Amino acid sequence: MAGMVDRLRSSGKLGIARIVLVSVALVSLLLVPLSGNDYWLRILTFIFMFAIMAEGWNVIGGLTGYTAFGQVAWFGMGAYSVAIGMTKWKLSFWPSLGLACLVPTVAAAIIGLGILRLRGHYFAISTLALGIAMGELIKNLDYFGGASGLSLPIGPSFTYFYYLMLAGMILSVLAVWAISRSRFGYALYAIRENETAASTLGINTTYYKTTAYAISALLTGLAGGIYAYWTSFIDAPTVFSIVFNVDMVVMVVLGGAGTIFGPVIGAFILEGLNEVLGSTFLELHAIIFGAVIVLIVLFMPEGLSGLVSQGRFSVRKFVSNLKTYKV
Amino acid sequence: MVFGQQIINGLLLGGVLTLVALGFSLVWGIMNIINLAHGSFVMLGAYMTFWMFNLFGIDPFLSIPISMAILFVIGYGLQIGLINWVVRAPVLITLLLTFGLDLVIISISLLLWSANTRSVNPSYFGKSIGIGSMVIPYVQLAVLVLALIITALLALLLSRTRTGQSIRAVGYDYTGAKVIGISIARTYALTFGIGAALAGAAGALLVIIRPVTPSIGPEYTVLAFAVCVLGGLGNVSGALVGGLIFGMVEVFVSAYIGAGYSEAFVFALLIVVLVIRSQGILGREYSSGVEE
Amino acid sequence: MKDVVLRAENLKKTFGALAATNDVSFELREGEILGLIGPTGAGKTTLVNLLTGVDKPSEGRVEFGGKDITGWAPHRVGSTGLSRTFQVVKPFLHMSVQENVTVGALFGQGQRKSMNTARERADEVLELVELAPKADAPAASLTLQDRKRLELAKALAADPTALLLDEVMAGLHATEIENAISLVRRIGEGGVSVVVIEHVMKAIMQLCDRIIVLDQGAIIAEGEPEQVVRDPAVIRAYLGERWAERMEQDGEENRSEA
């Protein structure tokens, strides 16, 4: 993860070129629904959803350095909050979406106080177990529809959800941008770099990392909440899927952990690839996707920006990356 | 007596869980790698036994050494070909790599063998010993005994053989082992191969007592982790203690709370154990609070 | 007499049966530079850990600025004005030098809420420790000497009332040590009370108003530098029994000759 902050700094400075690039991208994304192509609308909506989750992971994994592997717990919680709110409590969508943000945030703050004492493998696997346990629990509770899932009221048009997810993605990018240049963000970097040193400098590490975890849960829950209403049917195996879990992590690694736009770029590449693979090689899809993860990890453990050497893209970096961690 | 029967069932399951955890613990302890594909190695072992029985009529117990040998080769190859390349990378990288592997293994298995539930049922499977009102099926008893034998064999391998000693040397002091001329890459491959072979044996025994599908892997990976955490990492007896405890927990939760809850319960227990232990009840080894 | 800034009372820390710190009491006065010396393994770093909340004492009290801070979490200690450096330096490797120091300015006793004022403070401190030219370099690119300076700068940026320096000169060569000595002196002159833990006796002798000697977890001598280094107990702790006897004999011979 070397050079994380160097990259963060460079991407934090909003140069003219960057502003132009982002504006052009944003305007074209705003115009896509005019084409009336539902297929592309659907794919892009998925990409935005993963981008939100990836930015959420970026807050705890990229900025704070805690490799959470169970973010689906928050995604699922968000999805079920909307589903339960709309079907059982007869709330309208917006208050339900509020719940989808609130419930995971509170849960992550409470659970985080415990599991954020763990580091490395121990933290990674307990979050993984958390995601699985949450899914198993929901699957067994009749109130949540049990194994057969829950059907929600049919929502508005595809375009509506497209803009909603897009807004969510913009919100999550802005959140990471704001954090990265704030006092709060500096506390997170210090925790990531050396927690003991951070605490002796006066940083209340428990408070800051728990808050970071809660924010990541909020963003992830938001994505889950919109997803539930969009697909109008959810069940535990889907919204607590381990694959979702790791997807968002790989996206961040690919795009560059700790950067502002990296997770979004990672989401576009990986989810785009996923869609292409899924429609072209239905059967082989997961195999190729697994292989892609392996290749990314082997050849670009520091993401795309790790391939850039002295400001220029360098093929040679592939090879030198490969040798970095070899025994 | 139902309670006594549950204890017996817990012990029988615990034996297999020990074996599931053993290879995982070895790989983790020696190389500091959490192998997220470990559970899928168990699954592969189970399917090999299943196919050898169904296609060639090989007795499930006799197929164990064959499953182990094949898994050893797969494990050795994966370590040499892939994992050795990233073995010193940050935690996240090895986790992602083994997750990618896991995904590939599961999806190939689904493609080849479908998602159908599989189990083996030789003719002698129904027989059992009765002690009072309690019933111990012969097959399950044999599974437990075999699990214990393989566990003991691993302990012997690690303590009494040259290979075992070099494996422990590498795990204990990487640089020191390198200096005295042990090939790290080869020793790592051996370790991973043995870990996979143990998973293969566990799978073979598992399919004898429980039906399997290609997607059981992740669940057993997390179980293996839980067993290691509870029993302590890197020693054989720890895996045994942890395995038996989780065997009991799973059986009792299924019996008294509901079968569907056992997984959720086991994982919740795992998290609680981790968090409590990290605070120092049994030492602070799991949270490197202050490195100095 | 000046006010007491930091006071340890009967501090004790046991790891199992081993007493790493045994009944240590001392005071650091306002504006003072206090030396803490002792052979390797004497428990100097453990003592610093106990004072700053990184380890919890088994017994005893720590008082800072009139407040009982025994058992406080490290971050509370750090933001109350008692800062420290680590013997094994802990730079934030992937952050720039200026960012490293900014963290100290944001969260220490100064508690600067705005990024701009924190950066200004960081620049001041970098100027003081002579790292200003490297402000934008990643911390990972620094040499050992610069990393030691960075460690100091991070602690200084927190505007501490008292500063505990755990071997900031170890591993430096002669000219670097000279620089470090004058730097610590400047810090003291700036009004910060300092505890200097050091093996480099030259630095201790030049800098300190007073010295405490620690051996096997306990204080064996205390006083002015010149007087402490002639203390037989201190010589024994450093050089062993035989040397101490010989020195004592030499001393007696000298006296009888005189």
Image (spheres, coloured by chain):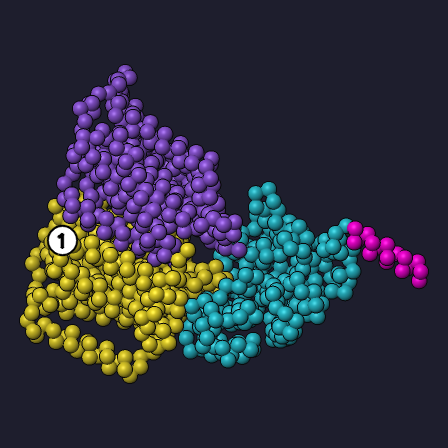
The color chain B is rendered in: purple
Residue C83 is drawn in which quadrant? Answer: bottom right
The amino acid marked with disc number 1 is Glu
Instruction: Answer yes or no: is residue A18 visible.
Output: yes
The color chain A is rendered in: yellow
Does residue C61 sit above or below B133 in this rendering? below
Is residue C253 magenta-colored?
yes
Is residue A195 magenta-colored?
no
Residue displayed at 36% across by 41% down:
B194
Left or right of A37: which side holds B181?
A: right
Pick whichever, B134 or C177, lies toward us: C177
Residue displayed at 90% across by 57% down:
C253
Residue bounds of the magenta highlight: C242-258
The chain letter under disc 1 is A
Judging by colour alone, the chain drawn in cyan in this rendered image is C
Pick whichever, B30 or A257, lies toward us: B30
Does residue B62 sit above or below A192 in this rendering? above
